[in-house]
Image (cartoon, helix red, strand yellow):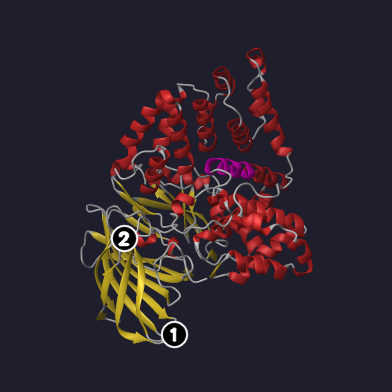
Amino acid sequence: MSSDPCSFSSFTRCITKHLNLTLRVDFDRRNIRGQVELTVEALEDRFSSLTLDTRDLNIISVRANGQAATFTMGPKHSFKGTPLEITLPFDLSRGQQVILEVTYETSPSATALQWLSPEQTAGKKHPYLFSQCQAHHCRSMIPCQDSPSIKHTYYAQVSVPKDLVAVMSAMRDGQAVDPQDSNRVVYRFRQPVPMPSYLIAIVVGALESREIGPRSRVWSEKEFVDKAVFEFSETETMLKTAEDLAGPYVWGQYDILVLPPSFPYGGMENPCLTFATPTLLVIAHEISHSWTGNLVTNKTWEHFWLNEGHTVYLERMIGRCMESEQFRQFKAMGGWKELQDSVNTFGANNPLTNLIPSLQDVDPDDAFSSVPYEKGFALLYHLEELMGGPEVFMGFVKSYIQMFAYSSVTSEEWKNYLFTYFKDKVDILNKVDWNAWMFTPGMPPVKPQYDTTMADACIALCQRWTTATEQNLSSFTEADVKSLSSHQIIEFLSLLIQENPLPLSHVKKMQEVYNLNAIMNSEIRYRWLRLCVRSRWEEAVPMAMKMATEQGRMKFTRPLFKEVYNFEKFRELALQMFRDHRAAMHPVTAGLVAKDLKVDVSL
């Protein structure tokens, strides 16, 4: 497999082995001035030119082993950026390495970086910077071979104003006053485990940290730090549980950084330093990525399900160990519903609902959905049932991780290993409709039979509400939800969202007896507000808009904007709120909400 449709870099001809970064973070100009030394190994003889990925970077100079190298910038592509074509002043033979030194600066519009003004932080005094490189945004921060098929180690020195702290997806390696400027401090980091470019991450802000375990600290602004210590107190137990299932944790430190609320995803599994939003209660998913995703990585974004399907599988196995098998079954059922939602949103014939989509000329950000997570999980769960249950199948997953650790894989390689591992059961594996699972849009060909014990109460309550007449409403009481866990309330609301909108009288009664407005759990709140807006409850519109703009997790922000937009009376309000908040939103979130609301993206 020689090409990554999302990268310009020539990785059949050469590979990066190490990056040495020197970065100067400038909050006034909202840019990073950088120098990166790439250790590049030639894979062919008479090697004398190569291409790196860049996006909105200003390239100042390129040197090869200290000698000036000529470079040109190719034509700019809408989402892939601009290829940086470098000609070396000498030839290399296969196996030889060269150190390329690129001096550059980022643009204030770099898609990997979000710059927050002091007003956008909890402390309101200092600015804040964070990066999000997955899938293809590292190239807007560092010129590199920006493909998950290439893994390298890195070292970094980051100069920041002395009131601020820098952390990266690496082990901390000390700090010192900046020799060039006594008002600045240089923080140093090293990442000795080879990893793909999309896992390089940086945060700069008024950060504090507290220890939460023998290999874990939590980092955040001081306003969040005590709450975070409490919220993530089970981290070490989860790490140990994951190690029992998947093998030793190889990254040394497992720290958690609690981001400001504008972060577009629930979490990001940056090595040594998971990024989490204040809304994220479940760290099991990001911990699981330490094995599936970070240690064994999808070779291109078309095989993203290898990262996410296995991670969801592992996350639910952790849930099984820490809670119960019934809890795992309940989560699996909820996941199937998420998949149905995604398929409905994209359309059942949309090729982006394939387990393995073609991303030729597709922006990976546009393809992001719960499909790789939940269709991937459903396939693995189906195979678990065929192969002999959770213990047997977890044996395969652990062996797959050991086999492909420190490398990048395709679905083909995964499937070949599955057939090798279960060589006695090949006749059963051959009966699986692989084409339907992997290359056919829509819902999977087989729906697993999940244990419904924990879901039954949710289904029953949902049915009571959907069938209730005005006269029945008095039969609902606070007791209906008292015995349900928060997971079950989420499920109850999810089920209602899949039905036709309830009459307005019903949602008003639901608020009266359950007081759902008072619940601050984001997963409950965003579903409840969607339900209210769907039933055309005007009082819920300001609450929905507030939630859509006060935090930036796309999972919440996009559906809330869409619901208000679809309420004709408030369509103009949704557009106005978007225009008012757009500048403060993360660039990826803003771009996708603009598409959802059919706003001109070029504005």
Towards the viewer: 301 or 329: 301
- Please name whichever residue, 409 or 75, is drawn nearer the observer in this view of the structure: 75
Say which mark, if any, is on residue 531: none
What range is drawn magenta here?
Answer: 335-346
SS category of the residue bearing label 1: loop
Whichever of labels 1 and 2 marks the residue nearer the N terminus, that label is 2
Q: Residues within 10 Å of mark 1 (few under 14, many from 20)?
A: few
Q: Residue at x 37, y 51 (%)?
A: 207
Q: Secondary structure at mark 2?
A: loop
Residue 527 visible in this rendered orientation of the protein: yes
**Residue 264 sits above or below residue 396 on the image:** above
Residue 342 part of the magenta segment: yes
Name of the residue lying farthest toward the front: 349
Residue 241: in magenta span: no
Percent position of residue 106, x then y: 28, 59
Image quadrant in which you'd find residue 38: bottom left
In the image, is 370 to the left or to the right of 219? right
Depth check, mark 1 against mark 2: the one in front is: 2
Q: On the picture, is 523 further left or further right than 48? A: right
Instruction: Please tell me in which quadrant of the rendered image residue 388 appears.
Output: bottom right
Residue 95 — which label? 1
At 66% from the left and 25% from the top, the residue drawn is 480
Res. 76 mark: 2
Q: What kind of secondary structure does the magenta stretch mostly adopt?
A: helix
How packed is label 2: few (under 14 Cα within 10 Å), some, or many (20 or more)? few
User: Do tag 1 and tag 2 residues touch (Cβ < 8 Å)?
Assistant: no
Residue type at tag 2: Lys
Alpha-carbon span between mark 1 and mark 2: 31 Å
Vertical placement of 128 versus 304: above or below? above
Q: Position of residue 181 (x, y in %)?
A: 20, 63
